Image (spheres, helix red, strand yellow):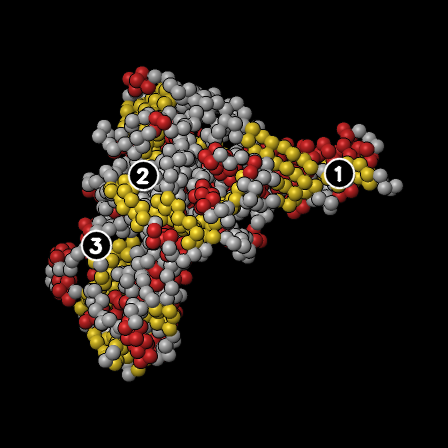
Amino acid sequence: MIPYDFEYYRPASVAEAIRLYGGLEKQGKSPVYYSGGTEIITLGRINLVKTGAVIDIKHIPECQVLGFEQNRLILGAGLSLTKLEEADPFPLLSKTAREVADRTSRNKITLGGNICGRIFYREAVLPFLLADSQVVLAGRDGIKRRSVHDVCNGNLRLDKGELLVQLLTERSYLELPHVSIKKRKQWETGYPLITVAALRKDDRIRVAFSGLCPFPFRSVELEEELNRRHVPLKTRVDQAVRRLPSPILNDIEGSAEYRIFVLRNLLEDVMEEMEGK
Amino acid sequence: METIGKSVYRKEAPDKVTGAAKYTADVQKPGMLHAKLVISPYAHARIKDIDISEARKMPGVRAVLTGQPTPLVGEEIRDRPPIAFGKVRYHGEPAAVVVADTPVQAQAAAERIRIAYEPLPVVNSPADALRKDAPLIHENLEQYEKGVMTYAEPNTNIASRIRIRKGDAAKGFSESDVIVENRISFAPSDHAAMETRCCVAEIAADGTVTIITSSQAPFMAKKIISAAFGVEIGKIVVHAPLVGGAYGGKSSVQWEIIGYLASKAVGGRPVKLDYTREEDLLTAPVHIGLDATVKLGCSKDGKLLAAEMVYLFDSGAYADKSPNLSRAGAVDCTGPYHIDHVSCDSLSVYTNHPYPSAFRGFAHSEVLFAFERTMDMLAAKLQMDPLALRRKNAIAPGHTTPTQVLLNTSNVGNLPRCLERLQELMNWEEGALIRLSDRKVRAKGISCIWKTSTIEPDASSGAVLLANPDGSINLVSGVVEIGTGTKTVLAQMLAEKLRMDVSRIHVKMEVDTQTTPEHWKTVASRGTFMAGRAVLAAAEDLIRQLKDIASRVLRCSPDDLEVGGERVFLRDDPKTGISIKDIAYGYTYPNGNAIGGQIIGRGNYILRHLTCLDPETGAGVPGPEWTVGAQGVVVEYDRRDHTYQILKAVSVIDIGNVLNAKAARGQVIGAMSMGLSFGGRETFEIDRNGIVLNPQLRTYRPLRFGEHPEYIVDFVETPQLDAPFGARGVGEHGLLGMPAALANALSLASGTDLNRLPLTPEFIWRTKRGTSHDSV
């Protein structure tokens, strides 16, 4: 039960969605874009999300695109994670997304919702950080393209009312050697203790993380350390750990020091696997 | 036998699998209002002020309730205001209640209640509660009304202390060659049943109180409300429809009392109180925590000579069932072994945690974790095979229990046989620790189990059988269908006894305390035993009446008659007889004369020869019989990162006689799954202020389908002679040894003694490093 009333809007175009947002914001309704709704429902019922209006973006054609254009994969923000897993245009994304929540939830959770949600793991963004993807954003100034790094690496940097419409990924990245590992506090259920996704491009290994910090990230400095092939792996891992952003999460999923312990092992596993591939 | 032992489908299965089954939350009544709780965000705080003025003005609000000094409620100690008064003692305690026309209105108003709290020092563990300078959680413990088997110590935080003194422990240790001592602990956790607690309460113009509730204890709800509020007991009618999982968590009476108060506040209109998942985890009673020390002494060939235990059960903020839990832990304080010298102090200790209800196994998996871990440590010190150590000391007829009950071939099962079978099923001969690679090992851990059911010595169960005009029979029993299929098993017993088809027995699923004979509580694996005895007694009564009327029609002595196949017939000439349908509602002669009337069978059963325990030594008869068993777990463990998978879980339990093969297996597997979940993952994460950090299923995670191991279940059958068809209880036992067996396997695999739960990789990593587990 959501203990407050809110209005529901279903725009048919990006422009209409942006217009609605501006108008509702002016009326003091604190609108939110609504896609799968899993966070609005589960956080709304305990007042962690409060809104006077939701704008359902699932019926905007651009948000449902799944296809290629000029050697680029276009994925609409309104696609469900299950749909992405089933169509499997980006195998690394399928693997990472498959570990989010459970099947029933993934039928609802969308790509855009996972990446722009309040629950800070946002694991679906990791493959895009590795593939140097672009994001298509819509705002008051119209449609623009930005690097995923500028918007989604670390804390989310969207302007108020800005809508993530699509993610664009060069085809050449889609079939690169990759690995995705999710370590949890225990067994196969729960948020990540650490999720790591990795991809090899031009003989360099790229890595991105969720669950280590209160935001997903990819760090060029950390990758530099990992890719010094002449240095023994253990040393590289030690150096990489020193390049971690802060803070390291210290919560009921695991202490900060335990996460670092897990990370060291994970990095060794990832590098061994990727260097062997 | 025709029906006993067969995997008969549950009577309520079609309703459940089609989604048609109705639970308490499905109840809708005309004019029904809705209650919402305001719960405490503090574990211990004085309530300085409650401002309800804004809430009262909200649309749809009919009443706002706050705490009153009296009456106090509680099952063993009346120490709890149904709504907090003066102070709150746990995170999640009800502090105010709003009643409104809709749930949304009630919630909106609840959010406008302003409560000013002054935080108080928090008692965060049973060990802390016993410190000399610990804050007193109940200053008035002395004045509270208490049950006869509760031994409170006023001016301390001890709600009850049970002493077991058998033989002379000091002498036993002085004669011992090898002694080990161990400490274990775990925090409270939860039942996390699928159905959250819910009730609908109303009060009629004539004062009749009607409560529909998701409860295992509708008859107890009636008694507690009558005692606390002075309502004439016959004017309280409690209905218990199907219950969506209970596991002991619905044997406490809490939400019904708040529902009753809420209805009373609105002139008796029906009020629904439906706990949110958070309230179900926090506010409603939880699974008990424990701090324990165990000291064992034995001869150099492994004969146990002495055992000394201190069990500090985490009673949380209110006593409720915890004095009984500490008593149940005390009577089986050693595990199923013959030990001449036993000393145990089993305490229920107030803390500022959510308070416990029963949890499947009722203190036994908890105590066995402590004891069976220590058994493995003893085996290691002796350099003896842990299975051989257990076999050598296994309890058997002729031995006595810690409360000095002499065991015979009926009141205890065959533990040595269970161990033998476990040994085969686990391929024990290949060794308990097998190296798979540089990193991976496979390890096996075991635990013995036993349990008696320490329910009230005067607990009883009744059954009524009503004949239908077509010769079929309606079965009415006070057992609540909590998902165990007990009512189907009762129907099987009746079908067997009457030699008729089980499909022709109609079971009344819902219990209501006005028309259903009482079954004390649907707890303690007592359904098949007590209700089974009542049903068999009722069947005897029914048979007697059938023979009586048939004898007149057939012009013979009732002694010449048999009942079977829905007929009453001559033993020596079965073709001569009469159908039950022709006498079920009496018999009508061709000329219109009639005799008899509807056949109604009745029966009841009361536990026999149980006694209170001696306050100094604990001597006494706490329960009717001991179910025993042996369990094991096989894990694959990664020595680098301390992660592990449970490959197999094995149970061999002596259940006397298998009444319904698949149902029994299902009960054991379900219980094993809960035990592994409790052992490996489930716990409340409680911070230093006593706040539960994971009161949601996002972060409180029971074992999920797909994470389970291969389950291997086998039964030994040593009949309990006074039980229906010889069957022993089996609802809880699959759980009992799982945490200990898992800990024993992982201790072996990791090369470190693991004495806390849950057994997460981080905990194992910390223990290996020798640092304390304090991640929060």
Q: Position of residue B153 (x, y in %)?
A: 33, 25
For mark 3, give the secondary structure. Answer: loop
Look at 75% across and 33% down and name the residue there. Answer: B547
Labels 1 and 3 share a subunit: no
Please state which of residues A228 and B767 is positioned toward the viewer in this rendering.
B767
Labels 1 and 2 share a subunit: yes
For mark 2, give the secondary structure. Answer: loop
Q: Which residue is mark 1?
A: B597
Q: Position of residue B580 (x, y in %)?
A: 75, 41
Look at 50% across and 24% down and name the residue there. Answer: B610
**Which chain's residue wears label 1?**
B
A171 horizontally vs A37: left or right = left
Q: Which residue is mark 3?
A: A249
Q: Residue furthest bottom?
A: A70
Q: Quadrant of residue A80 in the image?
A: bottom left
Look at 63% across and 41% down and name the residue there. Answer: B475
Q: Which residue is mark 2?
A: B86
Q: Which of labels 1 and 2 is toward the front?
A: 2
A137 horizontally vs A55: left or right = left
Disc number placed over residue B233 in the picture, else none? none
Q: Earlier in the sequence, mark 1 or mark 2?
A: 2
The amino acid marked with disc number 1 is Gly
Instruction: Determine crowd level at label 2: few under 14, some 14-19, many 20+ residues with C-alpha closer than 10 A.
Output: some
Q: CA distance from mark 2 to mark 3?
A: 38 Å
B77 horizontally vs B30: left or right = left
- Above or below, A106 relative to B404: below
Look at 24% across and 32% down and name the residue there. Answer: B134
- Above or below, A17 relative to B488: below
Q: Position of residue A275 (x, y in %)?
A: 21, 64
Labels 2 and 3 share a subunit: no
